[in-house]
Image (cartoon, rainbow, N blue to C red):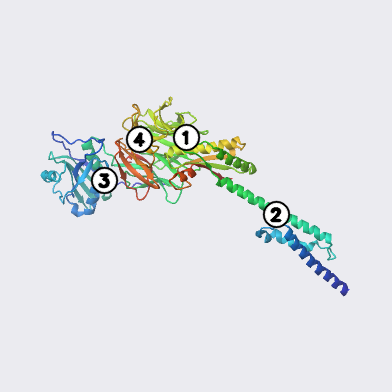
Amino acid sequence: MVFQLLRITVIVFLSTILLAGCGRKADSVAPEPPADMVTSPEGADAEAGMPDGMGDDGAMSEEDVLTERATMAEEQARQAEAMREAEMAEMAQAAFVNEDIYFAFDSFLLDPEAERILGEKAAWLQDNANASVQIEGHCDERGTSDYNLALGERRANAVRQYLTVLGIDSGRLSTISYGEEQPLDPGHDEAAWSRNRRAHFVIIQ
Amino acid sequence: MRIVSRKCAILALVLVLCWVVYPSSQERIVIDIDQVGGYLLPLALPRFKGETADPVLGQQIRTVMQRDLERTGLFRIIESNGNSVQTIKALPYGDWSSLGAAGVIAGQLDVSQGRVPLTLQLTLHDVAQQSMLFGKVYQGSREGYRRMAHRFSDHVLQIFTGEQGPFDTQVMCVSPVPDSKATEIVRMDYDGHGVRRLVANGALNLAPVLSPDGSVLAYTSYRAGSPDIYLLNLRDGQEERLTSEPGLALAGSWSPDGRYLALSRTVDGNNDIFLYDTRRRRFKRLTNDLGIDVSPSFAPDGHRLAFTSDRGGSPQLYLTNVQGGRPARLTFEGTYNTAPAWSPRDDTIAYVGRGEDRAMAIYTIHAESRQRQRLSFAPRQYEAPAWDPHGRFLMHTSRVGGAWQRYMVRQDGHDKILPAANGLDCLSPQWVARVKPSS
């Protein structure tokens, strides 16, 4: 009886070592999870759950271990994929917000580059069907304040119009003009002016 | 939002008593306010009688008058060589003649601890005629001295040119709040003193336009999330939001009788000129065009208006009337003509244009003859010009690089920089008659 108990203890001990070794092997096969995943509660649960997989007799067949290993790798890959997707969504949103549409002096016409960027923005808006955005129209410091406020409005409206042509619901797109009142670049040369003649996107919801 | 109460009760005490002066029948000095170039009438402005009791105040008063008069480009204040006046009614004219003065402004200053802290008597003399042309007595608080000096400067200009002076006036302007995206609406004396904040709410506030009687301030604020026009009653502090549809709304000009506010407004994505009838409380559309229509400015007849439109492919000035007839294009030269300001006295319209050299400049154009004149040549970023309440001088704020400067400009282009107000910039100035303090 005592001998049998000892035998079981040895088997459990060996199984644990084997399992730990498999765990490391699985780690090296699966894509490396981001650092913060290792300490995440989900990860901790998964590790803690491993001894529960053992049979009542305290032993574990090789098939069981392999299945467990495959499940873990899949799970980690899925999580890494979700992480990548979240990162990409974040990058797409950052690009959506940070990439402005530029205009020529005293113009609200969209050039091919502006249309290309707006195509990307429309794609983002389609991927994020719950988002509502405000399109800000801006001008450079040349010319007079009132006219530039009206021109900024025309720029914002031109962008809004183009996006609706690309199939975005106009109810998701509001506009506001800041004219020459809020330049992005405080400079007073053509480089600054060209950066300030812009439509800028703000996600409001 | 807050209205700074004007504790001008004492200033209201500025009693103005005039003693009648009839110039002799001899030739009088007459100068043309629109003279181009040269001759500056030499005036002496010696230390006042009684000034030793408060030399600092005496100097301050004389400085205000000297700056006022020199800004016109019509006068120069000559050295008095230590001469002061013993009497202000009959001067030793020979002494002033030998100093080269054509005129003398003489004064007597009385400061008191009593109920009337400051009494200032000022007289204007023609040296060649050896006679007094004009005189005034001002009484009020010590702080009221600037206003007394401005008023006498106005009289001096009127006596020599026949035109009412622009000195006892105020300016409404947009003042950017440092290190923020907010702007405030402020009122100040034309020379930047006595700043009062009228609208300060942490938001962008633009395009202030004061009604002719000084009671209602129309302006655009972003404080509710979109650029809308508000009407602020400066007498009781009541405020009304005039527009609320999405899109831009900008006040442009009040009709001379104060009943109509001409404004631009975007309805269903289309920006047009409207009149708001304050009596019947409703809007009337004056233009209906797919292009931009902004900056309406009333003619003094209260019937015609000038405005900016890009309906022809580039921003140009157009004329219409309160009936909303077919707009007639006024400017044809250059590809950028905006911000018309119709003179309160005649058919001259000042605006910002882009000349043949592609540089922005201040221009005037006559509404009928279309005769055009360029008033500025320095390469600056010019913003909308404004007329003084009598239509003789223009004011504009413009900049080179980041530094804004406010200018007072004569119709021949002669200009002088106006002082900054306590470090505040004064953008989009509207030059108005002094607003009477509320009771």
Mark nearer the viewer, 3 or 4: 4
Whether B36 is drawn above or below B424: the answer is: above
Is the Cβ of the residue at disc 2 closer than 8 Å to that at disc 4? Answer: no
In which quadrant will I find the C terminus of chain B? top left
Residue on which the image places disc 2: A79
Within-10-Å neighbours for mark 3: few <14, some 14–19, many 20+ = some
Mark nearer the viewer, 1 or 3: 3
Q: Identify the residue at image location x=78%, y=64%.
A: A19
Is the Cβ of the residue at disc 2 closer than 8 Å to that at disc 3? Answer: no
Within-10-Å neighbours for mark 4: few <14, some 14–19, many 20+ = many
Within-10-Å neighbours for mark 1: few <14, some 14–19, many 20+ = many
Residue on which the image places disc 1: B265
Q: Identity of the amino acid at label 3? A: Arg
Residue A95 position within the rendered picture, expressed as x and y whole percent measured from the top left: 58, 47
Q: Identity of the amino acid at label 4? A: Tyr
Q: CA distance from mark 2 to mark 3?
A: 76 Å
Left or right of residue A87: residue A156: left
Tell me whether marks 2 and 4 sit on the same chain.
no
Mark nearer the viewer, 4 or 1: 4
Residue B105 position within the rendered picture, expressed as x and y whole percent measured from the top left: 19, 44
Which quadrant would residue B218 be assigned to in this image?
Answer: top left
| Residue B67 - label | 3
Extreme right residue here?
A1
Residue on which the image places disc 4: B363
Q: Earlier in the sequence, mark 4 or mark 1?
A: 1
Residue A37 position within the rendered picture, expressed as x and y whole percent measured from the top left: 67, 59
